[in-house]
Image (cartoon, rainbow, N blue to C red):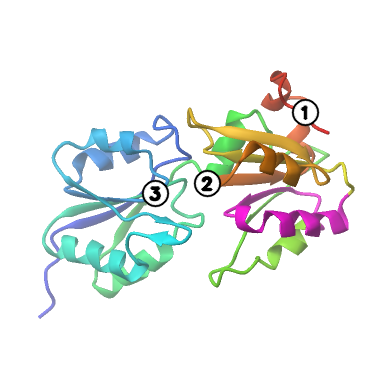
Amino acid sequence: MRKEIKGELTIVGAGPGDPELITLKGINAIRQADIILYDALVNKKLLKHNTKGKHFFVGKRKGAHSFKQHEINKMLVNFILEGKDVVRLKGGDVSVFARTAEEIDYAEQHNIEARLIPGISSFTGIAAAHRISLTRRCQYESIWVTTGYTCDGRLSPDIEFAAQSSATIAILMGMTHLEEIIRLFGTYKPKNYPVAVVQNGTLPSERWVVGTIESIVKKVNEAGISNPATIFVGPAVTDSTSRWQLHHEVQFA
């Protein structure tokens, strides 16, 4: 006999970091949850919206995983089979480098249907916070979003294809391979091609550097910028409307 499913699974995008950059629908789901499993990039202030449930940190950082993915999958299903309403809270948007598909697949194997609530992705949220228009009519008319490394830890082969594009490039999880990434872009772009790196985007602890293919690695090292960070490459970075130019300490050379 098929076991009756009493609980529910809701996968929620928490946005880029600022706890106000989450949807009202996401907040309502958090409030109603019996169990919240949250990631490393989720702002813990969001948990204050839930006073009745239990909260479990299941975040992953490079080289430090509190739980493996298959363990998280089992936790989700076990809580739901116990009759709990579970929120899986993820940084950014649920559809961008969030491993959501793996959790949905596992839930469906147990006849559990997930409800997804989108969030503001880190790259769009950070860009907007800095007045970067990722696209501009007649100039840069597309966006390329890629991971910095593949599931086996190697540099993504898509980086080289992106480097040949006229699109604005957003690279997530790319700091480990920053020097190699910039060398690839230097093969196809001039030395003065704009690059920005933003750490802890939209948070009070946010830090950033802006430079060029020629200067960005040195600037990152001098500023001590590290993960979690987003890399932006392309003319959009130094567009006249960008926030960088409102700060005297920023140098583009």
Q: State which tag comes first along the sequence, 2 or 1.
A: 2
Q: Which residue is mark 1?
A: 251
Q: Amino acid at mark 1?
A: Gln
Task: Tell me the CA gap for discs 3 and 1.
Answer: 32 Å
Pointer 3 with pointer 1, Cβ within 8 A: no
Q: Position of residue 156 (x, y in %)?
A: 65, 66
The span shown in magenta is 164-189
Q: Please rate how many residues cluster around mark 1, counting C-alpha atoms within 10 Å: few if below 14, some from 14 to 19, many from 20.
A: few
Q: Residue at x 52, y 46 (%)?
A: 228
Q: Amino acid at mark 3?
A: Ala
Task: Tell me the CA gap for discs 2 and 3.
Answer: 10 Å
Judge left or right: residue 28 versus residue 93: left
Q: Which residue is mark 3?
A: 40
Q: Position of residue 98 (x, y in %)?
A: 45, 57
| Residue farthest along the right direction in this orientation | 190
Which of these two is toward me, 4 or 198? 198
